[in-house]
Each structure stands twice: as C-alpha cells, then as structure tokens.
Amino acid sequence: MLSQIVAVTGVNLRSIGQRIGSSSVAIVGIAGVVLVFVGVLSIAEGFRAAMTDVGDRQSVIVMRAGSDTEMTSGLGNETARIVMDKPGVMRDENGPLASAELFVIVGHPSKKDATDMNVPLRGVSPTALKVRPYIKIIEGRMLTPGTNEIVVGRAASGQFAGLTVGSVQNWGQNRWEVVGIFDAGGNVAESEIWCDARVLQPAYRRGNTYQSVYVRLESPEAFQTFKDALTTDPRLSVTPVPEPDYYAGQSEMLHQIITTIGYLIAALMGIGAIFGAVNTMYTAVASRTREIATLRALGFGSFPVVLSVLTESLVLALIGGLLGGVVAWLAFDGYQTSTMNFQSFSQVTFAFAVTPALMTQALLFAIVMGLFGGVFPAWRAARLPVVTALREL
C-alpha cells in the first residue's frame, strides 16, 4: 500500500508542470485569499501590539472609580496628592515618582491628506519620564515645566503634519513649540503629544483637576499594598490598574471588530478559492482518466489514487499559501498608519504586524482550502469505472 501511494503521488506531482495553466488558477486563488487574510489581520495584530506592549507592571494608572478610560475620569488636586503619598510608590530625593496628568483631544491634520485627526495631547508632570523609564528623548530635549513647550511621540511626528522640532502649533488658547521627539518602543504612547499639565489646565479651562495619576511602584509585588491603601482610604474613590492591563483593555473592541471582518472576508473569498481548486483538480483527474484506469487495472487500489489527488491539491494550496504569505509580509509588515481608538476617541498610530503566528494560521487556512478543493475530485478518481476508462485508450 505504501509503495503504491508513493508511486502514484510521485507521478501526480511530476505532472503538475504539464498542467501549469489550470494549476496556476488554484495557486493564485489561494494566494489571493491568504494575502487579504494576512493583510487584514496584520492590522489587528499591529494595533494590539501597540496597545499591549506598554510599560511594565511597576507602572500603575489611577483613575476615578467606575471609569474605564482617562476621558471619563476626573481627579481633584487633593486626591492626586493623597494618591502619590500612599505606600508602595517609588521615591527618589525629590519625592514620589508619580505624574498627575490630563488627557485632551486636539484637531491636527494628517500628513497624507491634510484631514484633521483627533490627536491626543497629554499634560504631564515633571516626573513623567521617571514614571515611564521606557520612554526616551531621541531628538531635541524634554519640555521645560511651566512653559508652552511640547514633546511629540515618534509615531505622531511621522503621521501628523508639521510636528517637527522647532515648529509651532496653535491649540486651545495657547501656542505650543515642539522641542523634542520621544521614542516609546513602538507602543501607543508614541501617538501622543506631551506638554506641562499645569499649562494645559488653564488652556482648556480644567481648573485644578486631573484625569489620572501615573505611579511608579517600588516593585510589581507592591501593587496589592498600594491598591489596599487606596481602596481603604475613605477620602478616595479611585481604581488602580497596571498600565499594561489598562491599554490591553482598550484594544479589545477594535481588535475584535477587525478580526471578525478579516475572518468574514477570508471565508467569502475562500469559498471562491475552493471552487477554483475543485475545478483545477477535476481537470487534472479528467486529463489523467486513462492513466488512473491503467493503474487500477494493474492492481493499484482506490486509496492510493485518492491520496495522490488530495496530495496534489494540498501541494498547490501550500504553494499558494506561501506565495500569498510572502507577498503580504513584503507589502504590509511594518507599514505605519493610524486609526481611531473608539474607547478614547483619539488616533492611535501603529505598524501592521505580520507575525509568525499569523503566517502559520494563514498556511493552515490554505491547507484547509486545498483539502476541500481536492476531496471531491479525489473521490471521483477513485470511483472511475476501470473498463469504461480503458476504452479511451
């Protein structure tokens, strides 16, 4: 049985070149499905990476209890001061490593089409870089507290017009000068623009209030101590969330939407690709009717014939899957764009991510299409009446 399978399958695969036209239909069809599948899902993977690769578990965001985003949170100055003084907060010679912050949305044109986008403008405290040690100034310098200076995330500088060192922008009631560009390792923070929170408050009539407090803990294990100190204080009504958990939660909605759309598009296109594969394999079986009948007459069983046809279909699908995956990787991986985060109503800049896991998933999808495309032609080949087929000799 094994020798029959090897012999028949080998003949099938060696004859693919003689049917290059019909074989190309299946390969191109499956490659197109994989290309679209990987392209759409790479958006979701890139967005999730930008939103989840943020900080570490020593960084904690404190917001008003019941708030799921900074946009819906509000904290008074006294509340922010009490939060900073709680046990578990890391301190240096200047005091606690905590940053009381504001988060507003400003309209600013995109580089691509000059359309105004919702760009996040974050007011920070002088300790902001100590709270987020993963953020580094890569061009220019850090803003000077008490001035109308701003620093811009590397991704925001690349996506939005005019955000270069030395440029001046008009937002709110102020003119802002860009004095630096910062890098945050490709995560969501790079989509933001930073200014001094004390300057931002009067510019947007926020009084002496904030929306969140970013805290650097002594260690990840200090989170429970810090949380207990906050929740047991009757003066406070706040919720602490580790920074990675907060941003991961913000990515869920859009990730699910894009993933659902990607699977739906791939499924619809996959049906067409399967019909293409079925047509290709039926053509292959029809062109080899006499050959299959001769093999059957010589004593070859039905199972080796079925397996040989399925193997050919799977090989064509795998070639198409690899072709589509490589083209998708070359076309999409690392491509910078931005989209709306529906939970904060601000633009998030991110890069498409064609990950190994996504490529593996696409190849498995291609193999499934090849399997469905070959099963019916294989069944027909196995059921060919030997006597009838031999009459064509």
Image (cartoon, rainbow, N blue to C red):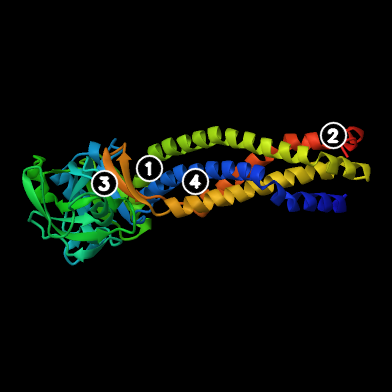
Residue 137, horizontal then vertical, whole percent: 23, 63
The residue sitting at 17% across, 62% down in the picture is 142
Label 2 or label 3, whichever lies nearer to me, is 2
Q: Are marks 1 and 2 in contact (CB under 8 Å)?
A: no
Is 350 situated left or right of 96 in this image?
A: right
Q: What type is the residue that disc 3 sits on?
A: Lys
Q: SS of the residue at dot 3?
A: loop
Q: Are marks 4 and 2 in contact (CB under 8 Å)?
A: no
Q: Nearer the viewer, residue 334 or 127?
A: 334
Q: What type is the residue that disc 1 sits on?
A: Ser
Q: Earlier in the sequence, mark 1 or mark 2?
A: 1
Q: Nearer the viewer, residue 143 or 34?
A: 34
The residue sitting at 46% across, 43% down in the picture is 41
Q: What type is the residue that disc 2 sits on?
A: Leu
Label 3 neighbour load within 10 Å: few <14, some 14-19, many 20+: few
Label 1 or label 3, whichever lies nearer to me, is 3
What whole-number distance in Å separates the C-alpha atoms at marks 4 and 2? 39 Å
Q: Are marks 4 and 3 in contact (CB under 8 Å)?
A: no
Look at the picture and state if 232 lies above or below 376.
Answer: below
Tag of residue 384: 2
What whole-number distance in Å separates the C-alpha atoms at marks 1 and 4? 19 Å
Quarter of the picture holding the C terminus: top right
The residue sitting at 48% across, 38% down in the picture is 262
- The residue at which mark 4 appears reads as 38
- The residue at which mark 1 appears reads as 251
Tag of residue 112: 3
Label 1 or label 4, whichever lies nearer to me, is 4
The residue sitting at 33% across, 48% down in the picture is 337
